[in-house]
Image: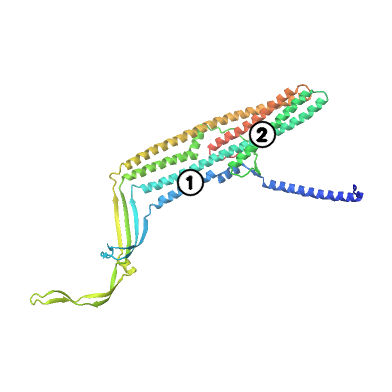
Amino acid sequence: MILLQKPEPLFQRHIKFQIVKKINFIWLVILCSATLFSGSLNAQETKIWTLEECIDYALNHNINIQKQMLGIDYREELLLQSKLNILPSVNGYASHSYNWGQRIDPYTNEFASERVRSNNLYLQGDLNLFSGLQQLNTIKRNMLDLKASQFDADYYKDNISITVATEYLQTLYYLEYVTIAENQLSITRQQVDRTKKLVDAGTLAKGDLLTIEAQLASEELILVEAQNNLSLSYLNLTQLLELPTTKGFEIERPELGLITEPDRSTPEQIFGVASSNRPEIKSAETKLESSEKSLSIAKGSYYPSLSLSGSLGSGYSGANKIGENLMLEDPIEIGYTEFSNEKVFTQTYGYESFKTKSFSDQFDENRNEYLGLSLRIPIFNGWSSRSNVAQAKINVANASLDLQLQKNTLYKIIQQSYNDALAASNKNQAAEKKVNATRESYNYAEQKFNLGLINSVDYNNAKKEYNNAQSELIQAKYDFVFKITVIDFYLGKPLSLKR
């Protein structure tokens, strides 16, 4: 038998429906609130980074720069130690030993055959009075090496700054390119809608619609590729900054229209400024001076060396004993008288027992002091001094060539950057003219296409020309901005997009 459920009354179903409706509404409110709250958190987490902030953050968090700073700390410690080496060296020595078997006790100068405990305590000091000015030249060389390491760190920071600026401009380029792609895609979608209406009205053939739709698909692909390139550029920039993620990271989009023509200084004038300011040139100059100091240190081994030394010490020996309880002993026969031939005796004394002298008594008695001058005259040492001097001269010549190589490299870079800036300026101007011309051509083609005077192929060709011109313009603009930024950088100006 099949049991049929009794249908609920209509008012009960209405009440249940209202309850369910209210529950759903409550859940919808909770979901929307959570979404808005999450969005507000994400908005709070988003930070707009300027170029200056990106560079500062990279300089403070880059691991390789931190290693460069550790190198500077190491050079500072070497410099400090070379200064402290001028001071006298003072060392304390202490020993505690036991001896078995026969030996001469150093403090009593007598044989000792029993187990003897010995203690030695002394201080020794040495002072180098003269050694061919090697210590002074070592201090000067270490000071120069410290300066060179600081210049090397500055040069590395400049490279990081240029790399960050390059990636920052690359990201700006993709941001603008994505905007252009989105605008073009929006225009094409509108054109698809208009073409459909014209096809439905019989004004245009369906083939024109298919051509426009194909163009739409192509521009959708272009937009996806531009967005992917933008994401990759953001990733590269955050990795340069040592940020763990790209989430909440956005960059400022400054107005670049105020960028002026490149500096009219000649490459020679720019090189004159850069060669006196650039850290790589200063580093090479400082390393040349350091190699010259190393040569002076090597020549110092030709001269005699004079040193002062002294010591103060004392000791304790268990064999150093002292008698106690003096007593009269039997007389001892020592000879005969000359005339009567009578025996002669002498009275002797002895000690009932012996004890080891106390440590304090022996420390005072055994104290010894020493002070002396030592003169060392180099006569023959296997030509090591001559070889060291010859090697130092080679290092000086090599450092001189390194300096000239750095100057030549800098001049070539400035020449190339100067020519690149001029070329980028010309290309930017030409790209602006091309955009203006293709924009007029595209607008005219769009009007004719809407009136059915040209087909979709001609319209798409005009649109492609306009799109390509826009792409070339933003490429030329950011290339131009980067090139003149590099010129300003070599002129000693800080990296900035704000003019």
Extreme residue toward the front, this view: 1
Can residue 177 be seen from the camera position used here?
Answer: no
> Would you name the residue on which mark 2 appears?
226
How far across and down, in percent of the image, does residue 216 sit? 73, 29
Secondary element type, mark 2: helix
Q: How crowded is the residue under tag 2: few (<14 C-alpha within 10 Å), some, or many (20+)?
A: many
Q: Which disc number belongs to residue 248?
A: none
Residue displayed at 53% across by 31% down: 416
> Would you name the residue on which mark 1 appears?
71
**10 sits left or right of 234 in the view:** right
How far across and down, in percent of the image, does residue 153 sit? 50, 43
Extreme residue toward the left, this view: 339
**426 sits left or right of 451 in the view:** left
Residue 31, compared with residue 355, is above or below; it is above
| Closer to the camera in the image, 406 or 214 | 214
How far across and down, in percent of the image, does residue 312 sit? 33, 61
